[in-house]
Image: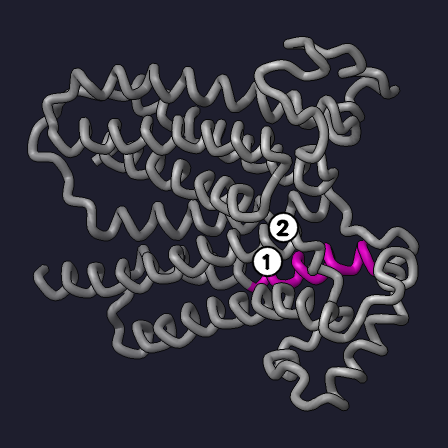
Amino acid sequence: MYSDKRNNRQIAIWLFLVCAMIFCMVIVGGVTRLTESGLSIVQWKPISGIIPPIGEEAWQQEFETYKQFPEYQKINRGMSLDEFKGIFFWEYSHRLLGRLIGLVFFVPFVFFLIRRQVSASLKPKLWLMFFLGGLQGALGWWMVKSGLVDHPDVSHYRLTAHLGLAILIYLYIFWVATGLVMERRTSTIGMGKRPARSIVFLVWLIFLQILLGGLVAGLNAGMIYNTWPMMEEQLIPAGLYSMTPWYMNIFENIMTVQFNHRMVGYLIGLWAIFVWYKTLRDSHVYMRISGHLMVLTVLGQGMLGIYTLIYMVPIPLAAAHQGGAVVALSAALLLLRRARA
């Protein structure tokens, strides 16, 4: 029994490390998008791509390859080699971090399997994580390919799918890891089933908001309507559903995409306060602490979003806003785990 508990703790530490790396990956991916660096590497070399260009000749060759694609020809024509190195850095860092995450996951995974430290019930969960990680790498290249054709910008649909899968992987690993170390309550107190369901709803609302944020980023929708709380001097601006068919506005109309991101943000804030109020009645101190943490991170994330919009998406604020979404999601997941413990 003690051995099982120790094994679970070791596995949980490893999984939390992977979560931390995914968190960094989300931020680096956001900066890569914000600096318009995502199309600087036009080939997918899973193994040899680990080594960056070394020497002036190698850099020049990489630059010449980049010049063959639409982003250089239509947007960055005349760019210097030093400027190219600047955008290359972010995309290379993003891909390198992805490879490191795969390595940090795979090597300990094999080690734990060989040592027979993984329980039968945990094995399929870890294999699923491994599969999803590989899928995420393939999805990332599929996203990049969409920008290597006539229109030099990645598909906002593929960008949102890539971000969404990263968050789902994070969510799943974090949930499994907390389950390995969270001790069950010794008494039945407080929350019950209905409030736990309200936390589940909050978690999926935050996930939906992250997907909407992906659409905002993919369409550069944060660069317009940079006032709050009004849009075009109206709470509900005209033109929200100007496209036909109407449902395409949800995905293609920049005004509607930003409006929906705002509205879901308000809903999350109100729902988080509602859930927090319910946690105050719980006699378990860790439940109340988790509730405080959740509402603070959610409301803080909302403020970050407002300032990011008002100041027209400066990179430091935008990166903090993207990271803040993962922090708020983590706090909501921790609260849910407490409620179900």
Q: Quadrant where the N terminus lies?
A: bottom left
The residue labelled by disc 2 is 162
Left or right of 290, for residue 74: right
> Which of 106/288 is in front?
288
Q: Is residue 147 magenta?
A: yes
> Residue at image x 66%, y 34%?
222
Occupied quadrant, residue 213: top right
Where residue 221 sits: x, y (%)?
Answer: 71, 33
Category of crowding for the residue at label 1, using alpha-carbon neighbours closer than 10 angstroms: few (below 14), some (14–19), many (at least 20): many
> Residue at image x 74%, y 30%?
251
The residue labelled by disc 1 is 136
Q: Which residues are magenta?
A: 134-148
Left or right of 255, for residue 138: left
Q: Amino acid at mark 2?
A: His
Q: Quick check: marks 1 and 2 in contact, CB under 8 Å? A: yes
> Measured along the vertical axis of the image, is residue 207 above or below residue 94?
above
> Measured along the vertical axis of the image, is residue 337 above or below residue 267?
below
Left or right of 105, for residue 9: left
